[in-house]
Amino acid sequence: MARSRFAAFVLLWLSAVAVPRFAGARDLVVVWLEDGRMLTGEVDPRTDGEHLWLRSTSPTFEIATSAAWERIKAVNANGEKLAVAEFSKRIDEFRTQEPKANELPIPAPSTTPNIATTVTRAIPQHNAATRVASLDVEARVANWDQDAATDGIEIRVIPRNTFGEIIPASGQITATLIGRNQLPTRDRDAFPQLGRWSLRADTSDFTPYGAAYRLPFRGRHPDEDSSLAIHGLVEVSFYVAGQGRFTSDAAIYLQTFNPVRRDLQRHALERDR
C-alpha cells in the first residue's frame, strides 16, 4: 500500500512540475524506475531498443546511466509528462549528437536487468579551467610579531577561473593602500596614498583559500593617525604572464573604534608637546 501511494505521488509530481532547462543543455529528461529511483540527464546517443541511456556533464566529469525500458514507470521530458511507449517512439527528438571517439564506453551488460548501469569519465582540464578569469581580494590591518602594535596590512589574493574556482598562479602583485582625510573630495590631497608594495607571487603560496601576503608599514602607521577616516581602500593588481593583468580592491578598517585607545593617543600627543 505504501509503495503504491509513493508511485502515485511520483506520477502526480511528474505531471505537475516543470523540469528546469540548463544553459547549453539539450532536452532534459527525468525518469522514475519501478524501484523508486530517479535518473536525469540528456538522452545519450547510445540509447537503443533495450536500454535508455541518460548523460550528464560538468566541467570536470561526465556520467552516463542506463536503464532497461521495461523498468521505467514514468517519464518527464523537458517538463512534459509522456507515456513510456510514446517517449520511446519519439526518442530521436530528444537524442543528443553522436558521441565522439573519446566519450564514455558502453560497459558490459549487467547480469541483473533491474539494476541501472552507470559509467563515469573524468574530463581533462582545459584552458578555461586552468586560466585566471577574475580576481578577488581581502585585506586587514594585522600584527605578526610579539608586541601589541600593528605591523602592516595583510592581503589575501584569490584568483578564480571562469567556473569560480580558486586557481593558483604565479605573477607580480602590486598593492596600494589609500586613505581618506577631512579635506573636501574635490581636493587632490583628500585621498592620500598610505603605502605601496610590489611582490612576487608563486603557485606554492596558495591554499584552498587563496594566498596571503604581509605588507609592513613603512614609517607611518595609518591606524594611529586620528586625522584619517576609519576606512581605507586597498587596490591590488595581479599580472599573470600569458594571461593578463587582473585588478580588484577591498575595503579595510584602518582603525577599530575604541574610546580608551583614542584617549590614550590624545594623551600621548599632549604629553609630547
Image (cartoon, rainbow, N blue to C red):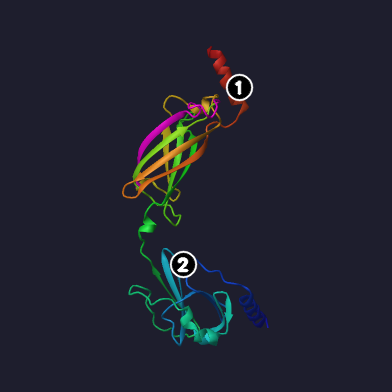
Residue 73 is left or right of residue 206, and the answer is right
Q: Earlier in the sequence, mark 2 or mark 1?
A: 2
Q: Residues within 10 Å of mark 1 (few under 14, many from 20)?
A: few
Q: Position of residue 138 (x, y in %)?
A: 48, 42
Q: Nearer the viewer, residue 170 or 247?
A: 247
Q: Which mark is residue 24?
A: 2
User: In the image, what residue type sits under mark 2?
Assistant: Gly
Above or below: residue 135 compared with residue 31:
above
User: In the image, what residue type sits under mark 1?
Assistant: Asp
Q: Position of residue 105 (x, y in %)?
A: 37, 77
Residue range corresponding to the magenta coloring: 182-202
Q: Position of residue 200 (x, y in %)?
A: 34, 40
Seen from this angle, which residue lies furthest top?
Answer: 273
Q: Nearer the viewer, residue 117 or 250?
A: 250
Q: Element type at marker 2?
A: loop
Q: Position of residue 9 (x, y in %)?
A: 65, 77
Above or below: residue 253 compared with residue 106:
above
Q: Quadrant of residue 1?
A: bottom right
Tag 1 residue? 263
Q: CA distance from mark 2 to mark 1?
A: 61 Å
